Image (cartoon, rainbow, N blue to C red):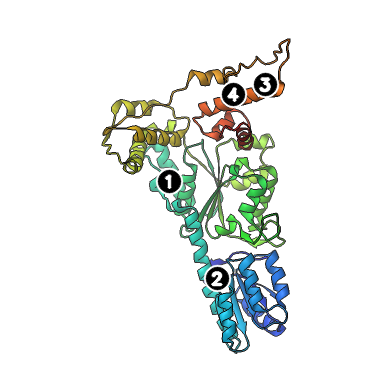
Amino acid sequence: MMGSPTLGPEGSVANILICDDERSICEMLDIALRREGHRVETVNSGEAAKRKLDGGLYDVIVADIRMPRTNGIEVLRHAHRVSPDSAVILITAVDDYEAAVEAVKAGGATDYIRKSPALVDEIKLAIKRSLEKLTLDRQNFAFKRDAASRNSLDNIVGISPALEKLKQTIRTVASTQSTVLVFGESGTGKELVARAVHVCSPRAADPFVSINCGAFPETLLESELFGYVKGAFTGANQNKRGLFEVADRGTIFLDEISEMALSMQVKLLRVLQERSVRPVGGTVEIPIDVRVVAATNRDLDKLVAEHAFREDLYYRLNVIPIVVPPLRERREDIPLLVHHFVKKYAPAAGKNIVQLNRDSLEALCAYDWPGNVRQLENAVERAVALETGDQLRVEIPVEKAKARAMAAGVGGGTTSVPAAGALTPEGLDMEKYVAEIEVSLLRSALEQSHGVQTRAADLLKISYRSFRHLMKKYQLQ
């Protein structure tokens, strides 16, 4: 199984499959391409090539058109079905116009080369062209997947000493290749920090790929990160590259790393140690060159002590820690942030807002903002949408009496919940009783966290995955 090319100053390293019924051709190309640094596998029949494609990932496939039983055109068609992003170079011993036309109709061969004394040089050139296109396609895919990845330090708004210290830390660590672990409460802007590390680094021209580890079940997260081969599971109809491969030579951001299951933590640790990934259903490692930036809003030291997070993975991730300060510790940045969000949302809403109400600004600066910058942004966006004049007034979130009552476990719904341990002579429906308590606590936690679900899960002392399960169970989403 093969992986994505690693581009260097002296050329590109590719994973190549050679298919030719002439063993001498296979051996010649194998020797020549390995000298170029490529990883090469050879087979002598179209059937063997199709089996290789079913179980592996290749950047470039070189196939002879004229082979018994399964010819190069059939190999091309099969590659187009199971590995559509692989480049296919067809070679032939004779000029064959009809075969060339058929190759184009079959799915478009990248190149069509006649066997000659210059075959090796022509193959090298064709592979170089294929890799240049392949690399550009993957960079475009990563850019479209995360169009905001070109953010820089300018997007981290503020002039407070705490924020200036954060920016300086980013500048310092960006030039290194070390793994970074970003700590911070929900809504502080940990992903902005990760993007800034990437953009300020030598990897800035290559992909920045982000994934929320808490948003996927374990099995799906593994296939998202590492990819899979055809037939690995139901619905795996073709090979798919994982996000680690998509981020090759760039940066991958693993948000909410604390929500990753222990079994997945073992697999991630191996990737960090070996610098290679194994797709789901695959048997061969794929080398990768990726910088990892992870983030969490939880106390990993505590999770390690509770055996809820692997200690060896923690130390592997926490090479360079970056702490993002909460908004309450940099209140002098609030006016700048409000101005920034007004400029962002007012034009889109068709509003001509020229100033912020002074009383509102004082109240904003005095509020603790438990949801941090994200909560402030939501408040400003809502105020802009509702404002009818040219002076913006922003309401401060207020804790409701209902939320406090729900936190105490009473009055959460229309049905009265008995006190813990209480049992009436008539008995009670325990399943319904427990459900009412859970719903009450979920709603209360959401109220107190202003809708920030990861913070709500922390308040309830449960994992984000368990929180999401309960939300879905009671249809509270």
x and y percent of residue 126 in the render? 54, 78
Q: Which residue is drawn at 63% across and 23% down?
A: 436
Crowd tier of the residue under label 4, counting other residues whose Cα lies within 10 Å: few below 14, some 14–19, many 20 or above:
many
x and y percent of residue 36 in the render? 59, 75
- Residue position for label 3: 433
Kindly state the secondary structure of the residue where label 2 is placed: strand
Q: Which amino acid, by three-letter code, is at mark 2?
A: Ser
- In the displayed structure, 315 sits above or below 470; it is below
Crowd tier of the residue under label 1, counting other residues whose Cα lies within 10 Å: few below 14, some 14–19, many 20 or above:
few
Are the two marked residues, 4 and 3, in contact with CB atoms closer than 8 angstroms?
no
Q: Which amino acid, by three-letter code, is at mark 3?
A: Tyr
- Residue position for label 2: 12
Residues 286 and 395: in front is 395
Q: Between disc 3 and disc 2, whose residue precedes?
A: 2
- Residue position for label 4: 440
Q: Which amino acid, by three-letter code, is at mark 1?
A: Gln
Kindly state the secondary structure of the residue where label 3 is placed: helix
Residues 25 and 431: in front is 431
x and y percent of residue 228 in the render? 66, 58
Are the two marked residues, 3 and 2, in contact with CB atoms closer than 8 angstroms?
no
Kindly state the secondary structure of the residue where label 4 is placed: helix
Are the two marked residues, 2 and 4, in contact with CB atoms closer than 8 angstroms?
no
